[in-house]
Every structure is written in C-alpha cells, then in structure tokens.
Image (tube, rainbow, N blue to C red):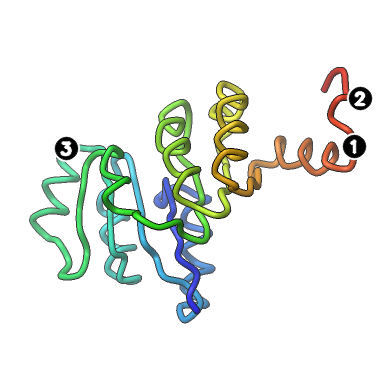
Amino acid sequence: MKKKIAILGSTGSIGKTLIEIIKKNPKKFDLILLTANKNFKELFKQAKSLKVKNLIINDKKGYEFLKKNKLKSTKVFNDYKILDKIIKKKIDYTMCSITGLAGLEPTLKMVKKTNVIAIANKETIICAWNLISSELKKNNTKFIPVDSEHFSIWSLIKEYNINLIDKI
C-alpha cells in the first residue's frame, strides 16, 4: 500500500530533496499535499510531475496562477485553515520544512493529521516545543527532527532519562 505523504514547504531544499526520493519510488508514495509560500512555478512543476491531490500557496499572485492553470486532479488553496477539509483521516508522513515562525500554525495542524511528523524548522521547535510535545502525545504522533542541530540533540538525549538532564 502506498504511503500517504504531505510536504509543507516543498519548494525549499529539504522539500525538493524529499520530492526527488519520491520520484525515484513513485509506486510507494501518494502525495496528498504540497505547500509553498511564493514559489508557485516550482510548486506547479512538482504538482504536474507527481500528480499531487492538493496544493496550498500563500502568495496571492501564485494562487491566481495555480487556479488558472490548475491540473485536472489537483485542488488549489491559499490558506492552511483548509487542512481540516483536505485531510480527513490521518496520513502516514508529513515533512514540515516551512522556515521561521510561519511554520508553527501548519505544523500544529498537521500533528493532528499524521502518524509521523518530521520537522526541519528549528524556530517552530524552539518557540513552541511544549505545545508541539503536548499535541504529539495527545494525537499519538511520532516526531522526527530533521535539521542537523536538533536531530543531534534528539538522538543523543533519547537514550537518557530527560529528568536527569539539567542543560543542553
């Protein structure tokens, strides 16, 4: 069975890397959602080559372009508030690679919508870890940090009782 995947920030370097992996294994993955802030041309190219079901683009000009040039089986939106309507059942995997605090809202929404969430955005983790951690537990969602610094810390401390660590 194909793994259902969402990539938040698919036009950045991490999103593009994941797209390349998916392209090499198209029978293993079903892309439910790709998102971008402004790079609508790259998002359109990704959607076209991968037959993505849903796109979210924040940029108004990009939204108008994607709506006008929309692919038959792809729905286009310009707001993360639509996530509840797009994803009704938990999907297998979400990559959150939206930079800065802009990634916080969609990350928190996707924690509820996915079995595994990979986060490549240290600002989101630093600013809202208590909230994210609480939502992960509540929704039984597994967490994988992807950025090198927080992946290193995560991989080191998972072997220890967190209560014994005073400072990192």
Cα distance, mark 1 to mark 2? 8 Å
Q: Residue at x 34, y 54 (%)?
A: 87
Q: Amino acid at mark 3?
A: Lys
User: Position of 126 compared to 102: left or right?
Assistant: right
Residue most extreme to the top = 166
Residue corresponding to mark 2:
164
* Circle 1 or circle 3, nearest the eye: 1
Q: Residue at x 82, y 41 (%)?
A: 158
Question: Which of the marked residues, 1 or 3, is nearer the chain's N terminus?
Answer: 3
Q: Amino acid at mark 2?
A: Leu
Residue corresponding to mark 1:
160
Q: Position of residue 89 (x, y in %)?
A: 40, 57
Badge 3: how crowded within 10 Å, few (<14), some, or many (20+)? Answer: few
Q: Do labels 1 and 3 touch, CB within 8 Å?
A: no
Q: Position of residue 104 (x, y in %)?
A: 46, 30
Cα distance, mark 2 to mark 3? 49 Å
- Which residue occupies the foreground of this view, 54 or 141? 141
